[in-house]
Image: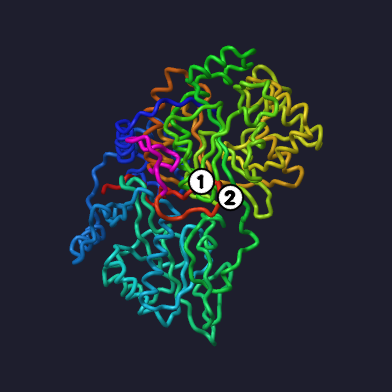
Amino acid sequence: MPHQEQAEPGAGAARSRARAAERLARSNPEASWPVTAYRRALPVRLRRRVARVVSREVRMQTKQLLSVWPSAGPSLSTVRAEREIRRHPRPLLGADRPLGRVRGVPKVLLASPGVSPLQARNANAAAVCEALEGAEVDYFWVRGRRNDSAVIAVPERDRDRVHLALAELCERLPGYVSPMDGRTATPRESSPGFAAATWKRLAAARVIRMTWYHSDPSGRLVLGPKYGCDVEFWAEEEGRLVAPRSQPVADEVPLHDTPVQESGALFTRLASPDTEMPTVRTRREFASPRPDDIRFPVDAVYTWVDGQDPAWLRRRQEAQGQPYHEEAANTARFASRDELRYSLRSLRQNAPWIRRVFLVTDDQTPSWLDPSAEGITLVSHRDIFTDPSVLPTFNSHAIESQLHHIEGLSEHFLYFNDDMFLGRPVTPQDFFHANGLTKFFPSPALIPMGDPGDEDVPVSAAGKNNREVLDSRFHTVITHKMKHIPYPLRRSVLAEIETVFADRHRATAAARFRSLDDLSIASSFHHYYAYQTSRAVPGQVSYAYVDLAHPDTGRRLGQLLARRNRQAFCINDTISTDEDVEGQQLLLEPFLEAYFPVPSLFERSPASGAPRREPAGERRREPAGTPSLGAAGEPPREATAALSP
């Protein structure tokens, strides 16, 4: 959905956004401890029964009251945890080591401005490896079942040395440890690794997870045990080392074998094969790609328009014709709430494997964007339309029909509207198969039956047209719209559609405003056509749709912020008026700042206007002249409210 952009407000407004985000996170009733306890205590089916008999207004009032309910006081375990930190002989706390609370328990945080899931995962694993090398332990990396936590194997006979080395490390760099008993993928609790009693309790644990809690300086983004490093103790049996739990690649290796060095990118799908990461020590059994590893590059494409630019408004006014439906020209379609800024933050945080970002505009640039930043390319409509006589265009269907003409775009790419966000880390496998097939995500919403008419909103009219064209070729009737999730696309399929359905494609590209004859090529037609020609399959991604015009929007945003359990979400609006936009901005901006507090590398510094520099860490190996996209952070599920440094 194209939007306008306002002038960069500067450092003062940035601080105001941050303060508003802090207040929202602290006062969010969906994150209060009574509401959290209620959700944990009652199964979903019982909560749904309550929702059917208790009105939304009553439920909201109750949550508001509970959000200010006085705490019963810290638990005994919380008091002990804080006392352990405070009384430790070494200075665990400092300016870059604030004391925060995760699930109400004090934890020492390691604060840095460039925090990210991939950075936290790699830093935790590197700390463990450094300790093991110092203790001269023969360790090796293992390809585990998860992408957000590393796995390192050590011989069982070295358990005491490993425990001692890790305990000494935690005294220097305050870390935490949890037993991995196989019941959950991510432990809910962790004990201080700088406390001697912790290691006594773990004396027989076959797998432990080492965690350092990484955060951004504000403490709103905390990455905990989900991104820890597992240490597995492999037993010696008849000249072989045998894994303590099931493995996806190999569950035993020779006791003595020459270690090999491989890029750390091989051990997580959060990094692409081209990501420059330090080499790691492994065994030959784990040193080769698997058939389901995606090794082709994936780019991202956004479309965006500055709907308040006087020159653009003049061109729009002078254009011949008017949109057939009021929704196509509604204020909400061009209202800026800074979605693009935060969508790019979500992309950098949660999809660090993206190679490049292409921003398609009508020769416009957001004021906060650094167009020279590594990893982003601005693309003009003039550069992609095969028939420049149809420009200027104010029809997103027309613009989307030309995306495959972007120079340098990879064969496989994700197409984003600026109101789409990635809420948790995702991998290329969430959108593509390693053999090149794309995935698509049908919505429960139906395409209305019948022919397009003036009463149809644009998405329904285009869906009806898609159905008619596809039925004429494949003799099958499509019935469902698509979820508003980043769309996995292939350039070759889009080019084929342009050739096979040349007349309808040309008509869509030539319509300056949304038309009753449009095809929605990128958001729907591509997926059904690719499916019928054996190049796409249905997929599933956890997803939420939020309509800003809905009266329940505040609650929905509060739930997203508190739970952070959706891989993707969309915040959409098509019917708001000018009067609605200001109030929605006050609701949405603090939410986005609280959810995505870490600026992307594409933003200018608010104070100086200078571009931000990539922090030390992962970079991509690219051919000369090819920009790159770094990694960034994900708000964790375990941090349900802002943490106080």
The three-letter amino acid code for the residue at tag 1 is Gln
* Label 2 vs 1, first from the N-terminus: 2
| Residue annotated with mark 2 | 430
Where does the image place residue 276, in percent across and percent down from the top left?
A: 50, 57
Q: Which mark is residue 606?
A: none
Left or right, 19 with respect to 475, comes to: left
Which residue is found at the position 49% from the left and 44% from the top? 374
Task: Give the answer, above or below, for where 449 lies relative to 453.
Answer: below
Which residue is found at the position 46% from the left and 28% from the top? 548
Compare residues 276 and 420 and report the one nearer the observer: 276
The three-letter amino acid code for the residue at tag 2 is Asp
Q: Which residues are magenta?
A: 598-614
- Categorize mark 2 by other alpha carbons within 10 Å: few (<14), some (14-19), many (20+): some
Residue 492 is drawn in which quadrant?
Answer: top right
Q: Are marks 2 and 1 in contact (CB under 8 Å)?
A: yes
Q: How many discs mark residues in the rendered view?
A: 2
Where does the image place residue 452, in percent across and percent down from the top left?
A: 70, 22
Left or right, 212 with respect to 236, comes to: left
| Residue annotated with mark 1 | 567
- Categorize mark 1 by other alpha carbons within 10 Å: few (<14), some (14-19), many (20+): some
Q: Secondary structure at mark 1?
A: loop
Task: Give the answer, above or below, for where 610 lies relative to 437.
Answer: above
